[in-house]
DNA sequence: AATAAAATTTAGTCTAGCCTAAATTTTAGA
DNA sequence: TCTAAAATTTAGGCTAGACTAAATTTTATT
């Protein structure tokens, strides 16, 4: 009797996936703040997910959680929905890339497999969403990500922007305005060792721009080979 | 402090609206069967809706409920979402008219006003959904319905099909196959006073068809003037 | 290694929305 | 008009998923 994967559980799994990608295990507090829920509530849910049949996470007290294979599949299902929806909203309904996140966050739990399939086909089975994030395949495999943080580049390096890992609509609008969007080529003109600022030449833009690490850590690029 | 209109409440209001349209007040049992919920649960919810601030229904024990103006607006909001979504699914994602109901029933609670507006614009502000049902306007007014049941026609009368008020996918597929869909002209060739069967000539179809009252009561037409 | 701070868990509550069983009210038929 | 059936309401309970406050464990700092 596999227990129902509710909307709430889908949100937990999605955020655990994203936290697992970077650091190792996902901590109670990180989950609480991402989910806007009290830490005690997270503990309760993690215990439930760990004891569900089949288990969706591996949980050891005070040491955070990791997804099991089952939990990962369920997470990738939601993430695929989310990223396909974002793409669909932009391409089909003319949303801008700073508006789509909220809408997709609600729709992702509600669409059927039929909807997913039709949407993917209508979009030509895209591999990235409007922010450049990779879309898990229909059989729920996350493609390998070859990109590195823009912050890690130094003077004279050239690279192509692949993805912007930011939710903040104001930042997204700003980046769009200065041309910092996926598939655009950039060249680092200067690196400041004091504050980590990068001076960039952006393909298609007249003047150079300077970005701090708060921004350059959220932009991911692939270096020229 | 206007209380939150949850997904569950939206479903209650939508079904109360539809029951109010036909008979007068909506009964506990009718609501229970439409919502697939125990009658006792309906009673509990009706009391809550009647006591909410502002009240969404007028409820007198043992006499069913009617929507208040506030309740009607909330119901029309959901119905507008539902019918626009059905239209969108057919026009944009290639769904057939027998598939859309389930999907729209989930999405109707989740889309934003932004989504609604963009969708309506993309579709050219349609006035009817794929089944011919009228779509409430953006300011939540339900257009007047001029149609009457096909079952009320008699021999030699000619009419245009306006809407098909059926959920059953199998029936919808059948009607589609025999060309009984909105905006098609039909002529009654024969009425059988014994079983109420109608023999119809359907515009664009080679041979006549015979339909029983179980079907002709769900098809609505406008007579030739 | 000791201790203060931070993170996490436990314990106890709450609410929405459902349920069943029993009681009551309405309605229809003789 | 009486009575049986149908409809509805009341009473009492349950579960998911949240919360707060208090207890405990881990981590960081001296
Ligand atoms: Mn899917
Ligand atoms: Mn995205
Ligand atoms: Mn609306
Ligand atoms: Mn419809």
Image: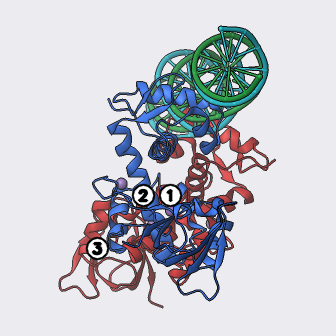
Chain colours: A blue, B red, C cyan, D green
Mark 1 belongs to chain: A
Tag on residue A81? 2
- The answer for how far apart the CA atoms under marks 2 and 1 are is 8 Å
Q: Nearer the viewer, residue C16 or A154?
A: A154
Residues at marks 2 and 1 touching, judged by CB atoms closer than 8 Å: yes
Q: Residue at x 52, y 30 (%)?
A: A45
Residue occupying image coordinates x 76% and y 41%: B51
Q: Quick one: SS at disc 3? A: helix
Q: What residue is pinned by disc 3?
A: B176
> At which x and y percent is residue D10?
67, 24
Q: Nearer the viewer, mark 3 or mark 1?
A: 1
Classify 10 Å Cα crowding around label 3: few (below 14), some (14-19), many (20 and above).
Answer: some
Closer to the camera in the image, A113 or B69: A113
* Marks 2 and 1 belong to one chain: yes
Q: CA distance from mark 2 to mark 3?
A: 31 Å
Mark 1, ligand 1, within 8 Å: the answer is no
Residue B124 position in % (x across, y down): 53, 84
């Amino acid at each position: 009797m596999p227990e129902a994967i509710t909307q709430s559980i889908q949100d937990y799994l999605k955020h655990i996936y994203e936290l697992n990608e970077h650091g190792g295990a996902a901590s109670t507090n990180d989950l609480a703040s991402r989910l806007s829920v009290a830490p005690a509530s997270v503990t309760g849910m993690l215990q439930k997910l760990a004891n569900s049949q089949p288990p969706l996470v591996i949980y050891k007290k005070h040491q955070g959680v990791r997804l099991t294979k089952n939990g990962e599949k369920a997470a990738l299902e939601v993430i695929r929905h989310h990223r396909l929806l974002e793409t669909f909203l932009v391409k089909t309904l003319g949303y801008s890339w700073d508006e789509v996140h909220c809408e997709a966050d609600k729709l992702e739990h509600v669409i059927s497999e039929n909807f997913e399939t039709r949407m993917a086909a209508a979009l030509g089975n895209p591999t990235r969403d409007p922010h450049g994030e990779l879309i898990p395949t229909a059989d729920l495999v996350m493609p390998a990500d070859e990109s590195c943080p823009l912050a890690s580049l130094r003077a004279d390096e050239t690279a192509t922007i692949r993805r912007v890992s930011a939710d903040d609509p104001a930042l997204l609008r700003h980046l769009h305005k200065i041309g910092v969007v996926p598939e655009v080529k950039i060249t680092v003109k200067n690196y400041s060792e004091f504050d980590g600022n990068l001076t960039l030449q952006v393909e298609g833009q007249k003047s150079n721009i300077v970005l701090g690490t708060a921004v350059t850590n959220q932009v991911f690029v692939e270096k020229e080979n």
